Image (cartoon, rainbow, N blue to C red):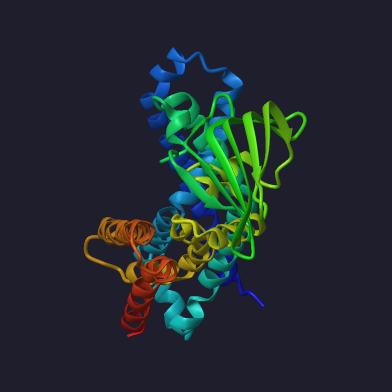
């Protein structure tokens, strides 16, 4: 059963967190508009697309800065409780500091579940819309940049088939210098080549130009040629040159399947995809760690008042984000373990949370 004090603290926890998000998101939108308004006008972007972009921006922005919003909101209202000597009154009534933490943990649980579900289902779609808009309208040569290093792509698409393309054009959905090699028991059985391959989304098929298929025989090879040929393949055109942020745009189930498929292909970007997957679980856990640190830091009445607590809180929050970004990038660009990189900030700040909590109890 929640007591009146529990309900009071829980209400302040959720309300302050919500207000913090509602205050900072408009500021983020205003800054973003001021930076991009000239390009939006130059490209004559329809208002509906801009409105959808800022909806996606809101979700993407809130999810990215969630730890800072949560930490500062807990610091803010707990410092007010401490300055009003409300915490002293609660602890003087015989309630232990651990018991005092209960409504905070309940609040962190509610926020964690919300963030977890958003990360699984809502954030991927928002991330896709947010990034597509930026690369389509706001970046020079953006549609090529969104494909990253898209030249000389050689990939295994299943146990028997290997694909090669020289380059890819996003506008026309066309890949150039295409070849497909099919193996049976490590022996090449046939090879398909084409000067270019185009995806037809209406008929769900590929059109190959200057098509050649060479089937290897024991005595003679069979060669089939055609200026233009429609072929059904089991891979999608995006499999040739996936967008650089594809992992961010997939829901949990699709992301797991995608990673497994890329692992079988021997993809060099597997660490990038694993970082995105592991963060879906690590970010909600950070809500508990940051909540405990915030309460431990701000529950004491300090000479500098709320300003001192906020200064300490901002330093810790930005340190957490700094560690998160640094180790995430380290895992993506090196052989460093993605699992350790993603969870390292939580481990370090979890130890800090235990230390601060023990001192706060004293």
At which x and y percent is residue 336? 35, 67
**Is residue 28 placed above or below 257 in the rendered structure?**
above
The answer to whether one can see residue 242 in this image is no
Q: Residue at x 66, y 59 (%)?
A: 253
Q: Nearer the viewer, residue 299 or 135?
A: 135
Q: Nearer the viewer, residue 77 or 220?
A: 220
Q: Nearer the viewer, residue 191 or 263?
A: 191
Q: Residue at x 59, y 63 (%)?
A: 186
**Is residue 290 placed above or below 198 in the rendered structure?**
below
**Is residue 344 placed above or below 60 in the rendered structure?**
below
At which x and y percent is residue 10? 56, 65
Q: Nearer the viewer, residue 104 or 126?
A: 126
Q: Residue furthest left?
A: 303
Q: Residue at x 34, y 59 (%)?
A: 317
Task: Tell whether 147 sits left or right of 85.
Answer: right
Placement of the C terminus among the 4 image quadrants: bottom left
At which x and y percent is residue 192? 62, 41
At which x and y percent is residue 55? 57, 35
The answer to whether one can see residue 298 in this image is yes
Total numbered labels? 0
């Amino acid at each position: 059963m929640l007591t009146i004090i529990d309900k009071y603290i829980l209400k302040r926890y959720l309300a302050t967190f919500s207000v913090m998000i509602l205050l900072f998101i408009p500021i983020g939108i205003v800054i973003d508009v001021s930076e991009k308004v000239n390009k939006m006008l130059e490209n004559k972007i329809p208002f509906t697309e801009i409105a959808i972009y800022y909806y996606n921006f809101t979700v993407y922005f809130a999810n990215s800065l969630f730890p800072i919003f949560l930490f500062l909101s807990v610091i803010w209202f707990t410092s007010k409780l401490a300055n009003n000597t409300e915490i002293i009154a609660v602890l003087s009534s015989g309630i232990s500091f651990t018991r005092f933490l209960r409504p905070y943990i309940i609040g962190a649980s509610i926020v964690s579940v919300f963030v977890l579900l958003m990360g699984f289902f809502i954030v991927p779609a928002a991330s896709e819309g947010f990034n597509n808009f930026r690369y389509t309208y706001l970046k020079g040569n953006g549609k090529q940049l969104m494909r990253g290093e898209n030249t000389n792509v050689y990939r295994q698409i299943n146990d028997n088939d290997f694909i090669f393309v020289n380059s890819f054009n996003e506008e026309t959905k066309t890949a150039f210098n295409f070849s497909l090699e099919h193996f049976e028991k490590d022996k090449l059985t046939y090879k398909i080549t084409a000067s270019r391959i185009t995806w037809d989304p209406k008929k769900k098929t590929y059109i190959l130009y200057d098509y050649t298929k060479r089937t290897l025989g024991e005595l003679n090879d069979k060669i089939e040629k055609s200026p233009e040929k429609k072929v059904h393949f089991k891979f999608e055109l995006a499999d040739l040159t996936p967008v650089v942020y594809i992992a961010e745009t997939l829901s949990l189930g699709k992301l797991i399947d995608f990673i497994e498929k890329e692992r079988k292909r021997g993809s060099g970007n597997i660490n990038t995809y694993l970082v995105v997957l592991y963060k879906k679980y690590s970010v909600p856990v950070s809500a508990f760690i940051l909540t405990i640190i915030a309460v431990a830091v701000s529950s004491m009445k300090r000479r500098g008042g709320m300003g001192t607590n906020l200064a300490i809180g901002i330093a810790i929050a930005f340190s957490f984000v700094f560690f998160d970004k640094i180790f995430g990038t380290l895992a993506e660009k090196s052989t460093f373990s993605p699992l350790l990189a993603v969870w390292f900030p939580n481990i370090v700040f979890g130890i800090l949370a235990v230390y601060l909590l023990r001192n706060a109890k004293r």
